[in-house]
Image (cartoon, helix red, strand yellow):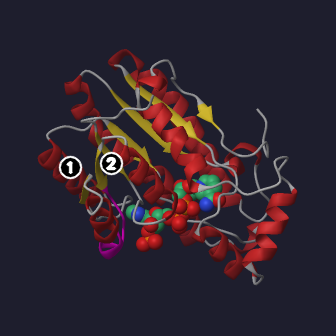
Amino acid sequence: MFNLEGKAVIVTGSGRGIGKGIAEMLASLGAKVAINDIDEHLAQKTADHIRSQGLIAIAAAGDVAQQADVKKVVEQTAEEFGRIDVLVNNAGIIGLKPFPEITLAEWNRMFHVHLTGSFLFSQEVIPYMKSNGGGRIINIASNWGQRGEAGSVHYSAVKAGIIGFTKALARELAPDRILVNAVAPGPIETDMIEEEARLLGTTADQIRDSLAAKIPLQRLGTIRDVAVSIAFLAGDTGNFYCGQVISPNGGEVMM
Ligand code: NAP
């Protein structure tokens, strides 16, 4: 049902974690995938891994918050693949801190990686998508952007911003047949769990248990749970989705 044969895709922050899983799934469905990551080594490793399976991928390292890097990644992708059909704005960082302790630098970095990154990449790919007669922009939001999380005001705020960005851009680009949507995962089993444990001074298992206890389906999501939502929106199956937020979250937030 999902066929992305010949589609050229950029997935930001796809050296590891959810982005890597998305890139692998889209490549397995026939897409040519540009692996962006701030870490050049990680981007190369993931691209090599995908190519080792006979699929098509290139490494395109760069910081999503730096305009020059974003331009370079988009130009490199267009040169290699001859077109750009799908952008997945996935790169992200987690932040866990009581509100009074969040520094201006941490607030700004959160804003720049998630929102400026999505702004810069989207602006840069739109001309390519228009010249193809359409395209897809899929932004990764979060359940915390939908309901807010104590101890993560900066992350919750930018993820809520991603949802507003998605809806407004979807309306603006609909006449060009560029369909803009968001996927808002609940807690997913990734390295972010280890990072949360480190930031909170607890164990990854304690984090998993306390997260699962708040989820009606009583488990964390898998990377595949998220990647299939992206595959759905990127292909013909997503033809009538515009400005929507798909929420693979086990029922943690119901909207
Ligand atoms: P992750 O494992 O930390 O992966 C994030 C990736 O983004 C890393 O490869 C990271 O590179 C890269 N990255 C960070 N800053 C970047 C930048 N400025 N430019 C380019 N790449 C950058 O996180 P994840 O769990 O896969 O999360 C992926 C997305 O899902 C994020 O937007 C996150 O907010 C969202 N999300 C995650 C969960 C969850 O439970 N994990 C839930 C809801 C939403 P480095 O490793 O080199 O820093």
Q: Residue at x 49, y 18 (%)?
A: 240
The stretch of residues the image draws in magenta is 35-42
Q: Which residue is mark 1?
A: 77
Would you call the spot at circle 2 few (<14 residues within 10 Å), some (14-19), or many (20 or more)? many
Q: Position of residue 47 (x, y in %)?
A: 29, 62
In-image side of 138 versus 39 (left or right): right
On the image, which quarter does residue 239 sit in? top left
Q: Residue at x 36, y 64 (%)?
A: 37
In-image side of 87 versus 186 (left or right): left
Whether residue 97 appears in magenta in the rendering, the answer is no
In-image side of 222 versus 85 (left or right): right
The answer to the question of whether label 1 and label 2 lie on touching residues, with beta carbons closer than 8 A, is yes
Q: Does residue 110 appear in the picture of this structure? A: no
Instruction: Please tell me which of labels 1 and 2 falls first in the chain.
Output: 2
Q: Which amino acid lies under the numbered mark 1 shown in the image of this protein?
A: Thr
Q: Residue furthest front?
A: 53
Q: Position of residue 25 (x, y in %)?
A: 43, 48
Q: Which residue is mark 2?
A: 10
- In the displayed structure, would residue 198 be above or below residue 74? below
On the image, which quarter does residue 62 sit in? bottom left
- In the displayed structure, would residue 26 be above or below residue 243? below
Q: Which amino acid lies under the numbered mark 2 shown in the image of this protein?
A: Ile
Label 1's element?
helix
The number of numbered discs placed on residues in the rendered structure image is: 2
Whether residue 40 appears in magenta in the rendering, the answer is yes
Q: Which one is in front, 83 or 49?
A: 49
If the image is split into quadrants, where does the N terminus sit? top left
